[in-house]
Image (cartoon, helix red, strand yellow):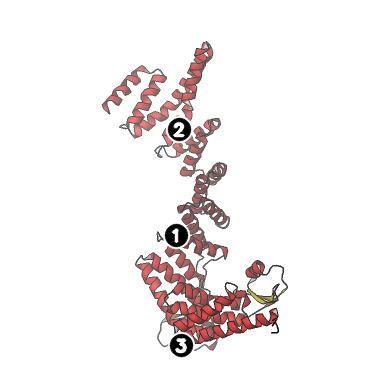
Amino acid sequence: MKKLIFSLAMLSATFVFAQKKEIANAVKAVDSGDLTAANSEISKAESIFGDKTYLLEPSLLEQYYYAKGLSLLKAGKNIEGAEYLAKISTLGTETIYAGKDADKNKVYFVGKEAADKFGNGLSLKQEKYSPALTEKLRTAIDPLLRKANEEATTNYNNKKFDVAGEKFAETYYLFKAAGQDNKNFFYYAGVAYAQSPENKSKATDILQSLIKSNYTGEETVYTAKNTKSGQVETLDKAAFDLYKKANAGYTDFKTEKTPSKQEELYEVTASLLFEQGKYDEAGKIAEEGLKKFPKNQSLSQVQSNSYFKSGKTDEFVNNLKAKIAANPNDKESLYNLGVMLSKDPAKQAEAESTFKKLTDLDPKYPNALNNLVFAIIGEDEASINQYRELRKAGKIDEANKILEQRRARFQKALPYAEKLYANDPNNKEVVSLLKGMYMTTQNTAKYNEFKAKEAALK
């Protein structure tokens, strides 16, 4: 028997024909409501091209998205189905990069990102494609769109944020499938998910994608008064321009631009990432946001806290100093800077100065006076050990000098410890602290007084 040899081109043509047949059958089946047949035909087609949808020419890819998306929607998998249908709109907005791969198969990459990823090194030409199923799709999804939007709003108002997030996402993708890429609904999905304990990761994925797309949320709202009803109506731009030009049926034409949501987007995203322990990512988002909104206190705080949590001590300290330079009355930054400086024995004087500024601003700021006292006293245990070593070595004069310096530090810190006591006279720890300080400064009367107070508080 003669051996049959098929060329690659012949095999490729056979595969393409099979795909066209199965996808066309899937479209017919989903339109007729036969989900079983639709899913069967879709599975047959997918078994041929797998995840290589770039092997489908744009018109065939559109039909595949249509059949796949509607079949998922009708099966109750609303978000997944809506995402597939939204890809039809992308076919019409993205550039198609067409050519042939190494095996001479025709390839069609949707958008530059896909072309760079899968078509690197290939000779590709740029094309545009106009989807043919848009109007048909709008009719099919209009009732689903209205329902999803209503359910999203209702669930959000009822604080059912996980359901609201899902429905807002569904609304976004359905709108996109109808040709309107209104990212506000995607933003609402992210905000809703952010308030659901189980879906915070979904929220960050959505919100970070919006930041990447340079989303602002600004919209132009077109309104006019209907002369028959007397009601002010919100119109789309095409209707607004048409009625205004016709000068009949409507009056009081107005346009209004809504405020940008971008600053809020950065705030929510940075805070959400920090809450999930993703400190490096939170710091980067905060830093990016501060370049656009340098006076935003929330972003500044997340940035500082992220540096601290991720162990970036130098960045944290420098950030605090920058905040204090911009606002010398920033008590929280002064406190945090004092704490960080106190950890370095070489920076005790700077720590003391920082806490002094804070106590001058607010003598009752929590722990500020306490920290100032210990910043002045310094490493007391090390001082005592040094004194003992010198005594042991017979260096009495040097040892006594260490003792005098220690006593001078305690004397300097004493007024602040007394203010601490005045603010909280029943605090046993403060009373014990003062008793020890009076003993060190050789104030016997005060030492006995506070020794009695300490005993009374036991």
Callout 3 touching callout 2 (CB < 8 Å): no
- Label 3 vs 1, first from the N-terminus: 3
Residue at mark 3 to residue at mark 1: CA–CA distance: 39 Å
Label 2 is placed on what type of residue? Leu
Q: Which-is-in-front pick, marks 3 and 1?
A: 3
Q: Under tag 1, what secondary structure?
A: helix
How many numbered discs, if any?
A: 3
Counting from the top left corner in percent of width and height, residue 230 is at 40, 84
Q: Residue at x 45, y 30 (%)?
A: 374
Return the mark for residue 104: none
Residue 429 in the image: above or below residue 293? above
Q: Residue at x 47, y 63 (%)?
A: 202
The residue under label 3 is: 32
Label 3 is placed on what type of residue? Ser
- Label 3 vs 2, first from the N-terminus: 3
Between 266 and 448, the residue placed more toward the observer is 266
- How packed mark 1 is, by other alpha carbons closer than 10 Å (few <14, some 14-19, many 20 or more), is many
Counting from the top left corner in percent of width and height, residue 2 is at 70, 84
The residue under label 1 is: 200
Q: Under tag 2, what secondary structure?
A: helix
